[in-house]
Image: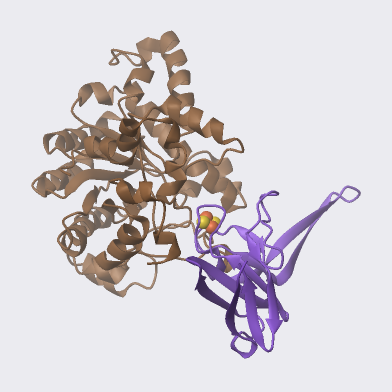
Amino acid sequence: MSQQAQRKESIQDTTIVDTDVHLSVPAKEVAKYTDEPYRSHMANTGYAPLPSSGWDRNLAGKIEHYTVQSPEDVQQRLCEEFQIDYPILNATSKLPRLPQSDLAVNLMSAYNDLLIDQYLDEYNHFYGLASLATQKPDKAAEELDRLGDEDQIVGAYIATTGPNPPLGDPEYDILYQAAQDNDIHIAYHGSGGAFMFEFPRQNQSFEKFIEVHTMAHTWSQMMTLSSLLVHGVPEKFPDLNFTFLEAGIGWIPMMMFRLNKEYSIRRSEAPLLKKSPEEYIREFYFASQPIGEANDPTHMKQLIDMVGVDALTFASDYPHWDFDHPDALEQYLSTFDEEGRQKVMYKNASDAFALEL
Amino acid sequence: MTDHIVASVDELEEGGRIITQLNGREICVFNIDGEYYAYNNWCAHQAGPVCEGNITGTTEASFDPESLEVSLEYCHEGEILNCPWHGWEYEVKSGKCLSRQKVQLPSYPVRIEEEEIIVTL
Ligand code: FES
């Protein structure tokens, strides 16, 4: 065991659910689960079949490039090294950015089959999020129906940087209906990779990835959350839970209070809502990563308090270069009682995705 | 304070490093330009294995208010230790963190005696 694995006892003694673990699936590997002509396309292409912005995430060798390419990688490098008891895995984040919607639809079931076959079937304590292609909401709904009986598929992973129109649009109602019918909860996830193609044109003039990456996830998630509320999605699908991954938590109080203000003035533009935006947002779940790094740690504690121990879940985002170790969140939880700590480290995630722990 | 023999000098060439367990801690000894430095393998950020990271240079910039030009320089090649987990940069000779003024890797005295590298803990 490395020194890093022999951490605080509090981490070792706590059950931890990690809501955001990324697999790196080579094109050739996913090809095995696709149908022709996509199989040949994926098996033979030298061109990355999924769009990417091409930033140098590893800073010319300053940061190690980790990938997770086998269930043993997840087990050893994440579960054992970081003391994660239940990782919730996702297999790809880029489907909604693919211009070829037929390929995206075919890849959707391919990634999901691969996730089940190569990972979830290997370890009972692994859970998975089904990747959805949002280009064809009816196909995504069919996919959710297909996966409904898979016990270890606990949520649907929807990339929020890319879908057009934004994800509250009634065009996606069929997808949300299928998710609700199958008890598959929703996890939204932004990305820096698609950000440069989307959003206002000024993005395309950012010259440094630090600018893109500071904005991308948060902005995508803010757009998604506004769209959900204004279209009344939580009212239409009251049994669905919504989790927001990888945007940190600093944006949440801002959205609560700003939407409250807008809603008081412009309620007639969001007529499906029956209560204040803040009340809906307090029913959503938010993953901690990337945990903010305030100069004054008491400010982080206040922020966690504002978001609330009922809403916060732990996420590592492993193996990406901005992942968080559980300690990074845990150090801020000392002001909460044991019940609050447990909610954040595993109970909220368990509720959000209806896990059987 | 106890002395620990980590290795003999010919086991640690210039630019190299040795990571070893001393008193339950992972300690790394670097040889940079013939000088020896010892640190905990424990990053100030999230406690990653900082000493296992790549040693590179870094980029510095200066602004000339006359011409309004920014000039970039790639410098300190071989002197910057990058934590492999998230890339926090440290000066390998001082343990100082480049982005956080008050952050410093805990260091230990190293000396050479009779061709042996000795760390005092
Ligand atoms: S743990 Fe070293 S940079 Fe994060």
Query: Is A141 above or below relative to A30?
Result: above
Q: Residue at x 55, y 63 (%)?
A: B50
In the rendered structure, the answer to whether residue A216 lies left or right of residue A240 reads right
Q: Nearer the viewer, residue A16 or B68?
A: A16
Expressed as whole percent of the image width and height from the top left, the position of residue A322 reads 48, 53
If the image is split into quadrants, where does the C terminus of chain B sit?
A: bottom right
In-front residue for pair B25/B86: B25
Find the residue positioned furthest to the front.
B1
Among all residues in the image, which is located at the extreme left? Answer: A149
Residue drawn at x 69%, y 70% is B79
In this view of the protein, can residue B29 be seen by the observer? yes
Above or below for A232 versus A312: above
Q: How many marks?
A: 0
Q: Nearer the viewer, residue A145 or A152?
A: A152
Asked if residue A226 is positioned above or below residue A271 in the image, the reply reads below
Judging from the image, what is the letter of the chain drawn in brown? A
The reply, left or right, for residue A119 in relation to residue A50 is left
Residue A226: give x, y in percent of width and height. Answer: 39, 27
> Is residue B87 found left or right of A145 in the rendered image?
right
Type of colouring: by chain
Write down the quadrant of residue A297 in the picture.
top right
Please, is residue A235 above or below residue A340 in the view? above
The quarter of the displayed image where residue A267 is located: top left
In the picture, the quarter occupied by the N terminus of chain B is: bottom right
Q: Is residue A135 visible?
A: no
> In x, y percent, where is residue A175?
20, 37
Name the foreground residue: B9 vs A118: B9
- Find residue A11 and report its horizontal and vertical position in percent: 36, 48
The quadrant holding residue A79 is bottom left
| Residue A346 located left or right of residue A152 | right
Q: Which chain is purple?
A: B
